[in-house]
Image (tube, helix red, strand yellow):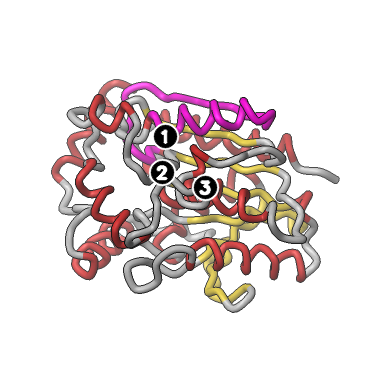
Amino acid sequence: MTQQQRQALDELLRRGPLDVGGDVAEQRVIFHEMISAAPLPDDVSATHGELGGVPVVTVETPGLDPSAVVLYFHGGAYALGSAPDSVGLAADVARRVGARAISVDYRLAPEHPFPAAIDDAVAAYRALLGEGVPSERIAFVGESAGGGLVAATLVALKDTDLPQPCSAAVFSPWGDLTVSGASVAGKSGLDPALTPEALRTRVVDYLGDRDPAMALASPVFADLTGLPPLLIQVGSHEILLDDAVRLAARAANHDVPVELQVWPEVPHVFQAYAAMLDDADHALQSAAAFIRRNWAG
């Protein structure tokens, strides 16, 4: 059954209309329509608000611990997606963790290039701390570009007066905006969701003429010393497989407690398909257990 589920998901993604590297306005609409086609469970609430001047959506499910927060960062190659679009996956994480999730609606490129996304992430986290939520009860979670943004934000926090959160979990992180990992070419025939050309298009939108190897753009090249415990999940059929592997190695070399989970024959951000893929449910359960293990208090 698991193999059949993987094949069905691969075929679904290959037939889908989304082109991550296509016209931004068109692809944002397509991305939203794809996400909103799956209705939320009746017991999920999504409340719009703001943190530090940054729009957010607070996602709650029954039985949550009010003292703990998952600060969530959506994907979309820094140009697509939104906090409202991320509610389904954020709710799946929140339910399993037993905490509310706050999804950050950071500004998107090309209208708001680097470092707008990082600035918004830091501002939202600072405001959450200012509301009295201790860092020991905050976990960062992000998928795709949001996973890269999580790592970059943790690096950026080292130059502020703010403490690190208690942990971070990233799904299929885009951690290398030089798009130079071995899997970019090696897995291109297997990846049904992303292409190297699409990523390179979005790099230009996000960075312009800035160096894509700089630490806050590509955390696989950053000094990760002092980061909190890190969980990295990735599928073996992703062109970003090597981003995840190198981010884990970089963290280990800098003495960061890190867990790398490579799930076989699944695509980019497979965790979003828990309704049809057992691997996704198992991965989310594993991520939730990791976050709970690292709560303090």
Q: Amino acid at mark 3?
A: Ala
132 to 296, vertically: above or below? below
Picture quadrant where residue 133 is located = bottom right
Residue 103 in the figure: left or right of residue 189: right
| Marks 2 & 1, CB-CB < 8 Å contact | yes
> Element under label 3?
loop
Residue at image location 70% in from the left, 66% down from the top = 126
Label 1 or label 3, whichever lies nearer to me, is 3
From mark 1 to mark 3, how far is it between C-alphas? 14 Å
Q: Is residue 269 magenta?
A: yes
Residue 295, position as x, y percentages in the image: 76, 42
Question: Would residue 1 be visible to someone looking at this image?
Answer: no
SS type, badge 1: helix
**Foreground pick, 34 / 77:** 77
Up-down: is 245 above or below 201? above
Q: Amino acid at mark 1?
A: Asp
The structure residue drawn at horizontal position 39% and vertical position 62%, both measured from the top left corner, is: 85
Q: Which of labels 2 and 3 is toward the front?
A: 3
Contact, CB < 8 Å: mark 2 with mark 3? no
- Mark 2–mark 1 Cα distance, whole angstroms, equals 6 Å
Q: Which residue is mark 2?
A: 174
Disc 1: which residue:
243
Name which of mark 2 and mark 3 comes first in the sequence: 2
Task: Name the residue carrying label 3.
Answer: 215
> Which span is picked out in magenta?
242-270
Where residue 132 sits: x, y (%)?
80, 66
Q: Is residue 243 left or right of residue 17?
A: right
Amino acid type at image mark 2: Trp
- Give yes or no for residue 150 being in the magenta stretch: no
Is residue 70 visible to the viewer in this orientation of the structure?
yes
- Asked if residue 281 is positioned above or below residue 145 in the image, the reply reads above
User: Residue placed farthest to the right in the image?
Assistant: 297
